[in-house]
Image (cartoon, grey):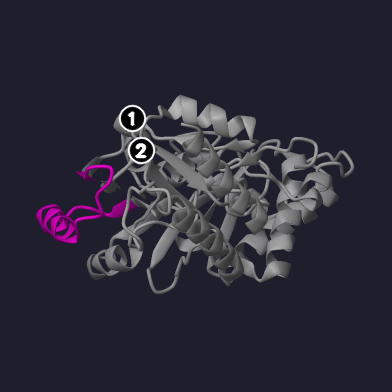
Amino acid sequence: MTNNKMILLNPGPVNLSDRVRNALLRPDLCHREVEFSELQSRIREQLLQVYGLGSDCWAAVLLTGSGTAAMEAMISSLVPTNGKLLVIENGVYGERLSKIAKIHSIDYITLSHPWDAEIDINALVKLLDENADITHLAVVHHETTTGRLNNLAEVAPICQERGIKLLVDAVSSFGAEELNFADWGITACAATANKCLHGVPGTSFVILQRDALPSLDTIPRTLYLDLATYCQQQDRGGTPFTQSVQTFYALTEALQEMAEAGGWRARYSHYNQLASLVRDGLASIGIKPLLPLGSSSVVLNAYHLPNGFSYEEFHDQLKTQDYIIYSGQGNLAQSIFRVSTMGAITQADMERFVGVVKQIIRNL
């Protein structure tokens, strides 16, 4: 390992490429100057290009904040006061969407599942049939609590049949998993720079259908997170508030690097290769995945802790070998660990990781 670089296997922030890290050193810039306006416009266009969206119908709205800021902006800006939201929960981040709705006094109901469960489509249909006043549905695409990739292709037609607007938390899937905006009828999705896009924490965004924005005379629920204000000003080349200029530099470089490498499909295939390598390597020493193959994203997989180890012990031993794993949350905290394959990580890094885990188990 060179200069003791930690390999981050947590679900963001991620290891940066040298190219992206060096972008942080570009000249200081005032956010009211034309150079910033050009930078912001370029990123908005690059984000739409990730999934081939046209700027006539779609807008990428940039925010300074974490992925949660984008989630909160999406929910609080796009569900009108006379609307009603259904939140699908099968992990921490689905539950976070409900918290956002509650804090903003949005009329909402939930369809709750155990954290390790897939979405119960029959229960969803039944709930929607009983609540004909639902106008919006919010769902997490990749629920990093367990690594489950929720099946949006099943949820989407149910929403389309009923004219329900689909709001997607794609914070940890955007840029590596399929997001079929047209066929799935996605109204908006929230995401961030510092996960599958390999940028720096501090910039997040919402990609939305332009006609989903409230009219400008609508009183917003928040000042800082109001998407209509951001979109209007960003369309004109401005910004309502100071943005994180250096993280914008890093994001435009990360998006360029990704496009040159073959876009989201190439990233999917790289992650898939690394995830399979880890899954197979851990299986060979009896460490089992939490979810069956085909239920997880390629971005992150959860595994049962090896016998005889607490999470803390296992984490600390791996950290001495320059690997950072991630704990389970809530009632999974003492039973699982999570391994993400995002960021500037190579096959050699992950082969060595499997070797290190094997060594730790042998030493037990």
Q: CA distance from mark 2 to mark 1?
A: 8 Å
Instruction: Give coordinates of residue 116: x percent, y percent.
Output: 27, 46
Quarter in which the N terminus is drawn: top right
Q: Look at the numbered discs 2 and 1 and tell me whether their residues touch, using CB distance below 8 Å.
A: yes
Mark 2 or mark 1, which is nearer to you?
1
Looking at the rendered structure, the secondary structure element under dot 1 is helix
Q: Which mark is residue 330?
A: 1
Q: Is 119 part of what is drawn in magenta?
A: yes
Instruction: Give coordinates of residue 326: x percent, y percent.
Output: 49, 36
Instruction: Give coordinates of residue 73: x percent, y percent.
Output: 48, 42
Q: Nearer the viewer, residue 297 or 192?
A: 297
Q: Earlier in the sequence, mark 2 or mark 1?
A: 2
Q: Quadrant of residue 55?
A: bottom right
Residue 136 visible to an observer of this rendering: yes
Looking at the rendered structure, the secondary structure element under dot 2 is helix
Establish if 240 lies above or below 189: above
Q: Which mark is residue 92?
A: 2
Q: Nearer the viewer, residue 350 or 129?
A: 350
Assess disc 1: are there few (<14), some (14-19) or many (≥20) residues with their C-alpha within 10 Å of its C-alpha.
few
- At a point 44% along the width and 45% down the height, the residue shown is 77
Boundaries of the magenta span? 111-138
Instruction: Give coordinates of residue 26: x percent, y percent.
Output: 87, 44
Q: Amino acid at mark 2?
A: Val
Assess disc 2: are there few (<14), some (14-19) or many (≥20) residues with their C-alpha within 10 Å of its C-alpha.
some
- At a point 33% along the width and 62% down the height, the residue shown is 151
Q: Nearer the viewer, residue 249 or 331?
A: 331
Q: Is residue 112 left or right of residue 268?
A: left
